Image: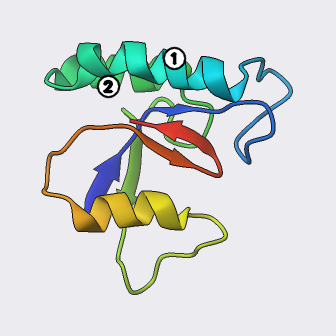
């Protein structure tokens, strides 16, 4: 399946960079506030992903590309995020916590 995300890392998460300043609680509050803005608005989702993502999906509308259940790498792709992708209906937009941070 093909997937996109908005990621909000927090201090101590695997996606944290030198610029990461949010605590886990602050990151959760941020994704909670973003979800209603992007849930049913693909253009806004893309805009936010391009603005705040810190991974390779920045500038690419949050796209993480195609993911196959049989070949995903748990070192690079969090099992909790994969479970969300494969256990839910296509098009579902919601919040998932992973070792990398909070995803929408």
Give the left or right position of residue 76, taking residue 89 as reference: right
Identify the mark at residue 58; answer none if there is no mark: none
- Residue 66 in view in this figure: no
The quarter of the picture where the N terminus appears is: bottom left
Which residue is nearer to you in this view: 30 or 54? 30
Label 1 Cα neighbours within 10 Å, binned few <14 / some 14-19 / many ≥20: few
Q: Which residue is mark 1?
A: 29
The quarter of the picture where the C terminus appears is: top left
Marks 1 and 2: which is nearer the front? 1
Label 2 Cα neighbours within 10 Å, binned few <14 / some 14-19 / many ≥20: many
Give the left or right position of residue 32, taking residue 11 as reference: left
Mark 2, secondary structure of its residue: helix
Q: Residue visible at 56% across and 75% down?
A: 73
Q: Which residue is mark 2?
A: 46
Mark 1, secondary structure of its residue: helix
Which residue is nearer to you in this view: 17 or 50? 17
Q: Residue visible at 14% across and 46% down?
A: 91
Q: Position of residue 89 (x, y in %)?
A: 13, 57
């Amino acid at each position: 399946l093909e997937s996109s995300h908005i990621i909000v890392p927090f201090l101590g998460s695997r996606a944290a960079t030198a610029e990461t300043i949010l605590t886990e609680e602050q990151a959760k509050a941020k994704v909670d506030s973003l979800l209603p803005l992007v849930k049913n608005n693909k253009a806004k989702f893309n805009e936010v992903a391009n603005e705040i993502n810190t991974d390779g999906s920045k500038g690419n509308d949050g796209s993480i590309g195609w993911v196959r259940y049989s070949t995903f790498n748990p070192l690079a792709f969090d099992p909790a995020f994969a479970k969300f992708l494969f256990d839910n209906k296509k098009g579902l937009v919601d919040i998932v916590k992973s070792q990398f941070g909070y995803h929408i």
